[in-house]
Image (spheres, rainbow, N blue to C red):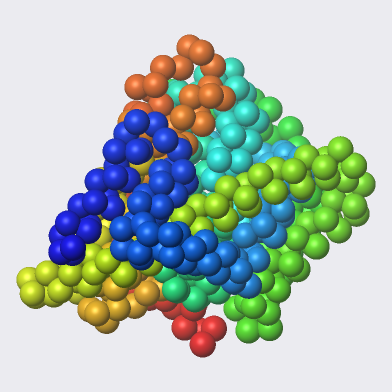
Amino acid sequence: MEWQAALALMLGSLFVLMLIGVPVAFAFLGVNLIGAWVFLGGEAGLGQLVRNSVGSISSFSLTPIPLFVLMGEVLFHTGLAYRAIEAIERLISRVPGRLSLVSVLGGTTFATLSGSTIANTAMMGGTLLPEMLRRGYHPTLAMGPIMAVGGIAMLIPPSALAVMLGSLAGISIAQLLIGGILPGLVMSIGFLGYVVLRCRADPSLAPADENAAQYQGWARWWPFMRDVVPLLGIFVAVVGSMLAGWASPTESAAIGALAAVIATMAYRVLTLHALYKALMETARISVIILFVLVASTTFSQLLSFSGATSGLLGLITELEVSPLMLVVGMLLLLLVLGCVIDQVSMMMITLPFFMPLATAAGIDPVWLGVMMLIAMEMGLLTPPFGLLLMVMQSVAPSSIRLPQIYAAAVPFLAIELVVLALILFVPWLAVGLPRLMS
């Protein structure tokens, strides 16, 4: 079979299954069964498919995924994350758009402790959104920062999706995790600047809070020192151990998970019920991720074995596209895909083609990986099917309509696009810290 026909069979079958509503992992599994039968030789191919599947999740490099997920779930279900947000709220006073700034700073703080974008958005939305709307905040300025900062959890370690991307793409997981720190912080600063400027230009968007200055001196700082600084120590331990080269991603993830459990015990908030919920949610999320990894890895192998990957690679090589234009094309494709499919599906569909092309063109894999994470993060906010848009709709009052949620996301999408362009032309922002590791 010619490589064009093989590519059409694999991708065509995949899109048909997804269009009729088959879950992503099962759609890839169905395509893998077809591909194994056609390209690997019938029953023998199915046996090889099973062996490949087992091998794809036997890698020790995947261990950080459940450990990173456990970190966030423990802090979330014991309520420590909520206490940290309340401490940050008390610390900020006499600033335009105070609660919107709290949502950005609190969301960024929680992003350093949890790799879940959904948990980040749901927690911030459930905690701060009702209060902001009650105080008369414009819905755009109330919902926008919460959704935008939710996506930062995909960039700043611990990020389960970054571990997944590094494993699938063959990128150093430690360098990819460290590479997302500066872009994530730059993005957070951009969100803060936008909120302040908008509120200064139009104070009616965020009415002044009369109770903002009720805490002074030590009463204002003590909750921050008690509930935030120790938790940030967990982030420092995880990232610092990787940055200094003292621990691998797996070891640093274990340090973070252990530190999170010890912290909840020290604060006396760890109960058997909370631990049970955290462990069950960790198991559920980890099984989903590993199931997807099985399907994706086998899909890539079948594309390579059928000749589709090498054929497409040869076709693009003949076009003599510059590396920069090739990267721009990859990012544009991800931005388009982000409008209609989820981030895991985007990785599974594109990585079998992107990474061989990037290797052939001599593109830095860490630089490309960080930009892919940002492009996929933007997909979380892109109408009509952005995942965080749906999460916000689920936690927002019924009076908030979907077009209002879309409008709230647009300014922050523009900021993320500026950060993506900045990294495209200033690669050091993505590769500077990883090179220090080396």
Check the image and name the residue furthest to the left: 319
- The reply to whether residue 95 is in sight is no
Whether residue 84 sits left or right of residue 206 in the image: it is right
Q: Quadrant of residue 331?
A: bottom left
Q: Report the quarter where the N terminus lies.
A: bottom left
Q: How many numbered circles does the render carry?
A: 0
Q: Write down the quadrant of residue 280 in the picture.
A: top right
x, y percentage for residue 62?
60, 66
Q: Residue furthest bottom?
A: 438
Image coordinates for residue 403, horizontal then vertical, percent: 35, 22
In the displayed structure, would residue 112 be above or below residue 142?
below
Residue at the top extreme, as displayed = 399
The one of 64 and 394 positioned closer to us in this rendering: 64
Name the one closer to the observer, 199 or 288.
288
Up/down of 361 relative to 43, above or below: below
The residue depicted at 49 percent of the width and 76 percent of the height is 172
Q: Position of residue 68 (x, y in %)?
A: 66, 58
Residue placed at 35% from the left, 38% from the top?
18
Q: Is residue 288 above or below residue 357?
A: above
Q: Is residue 374 left or right of residue 123?
A: left
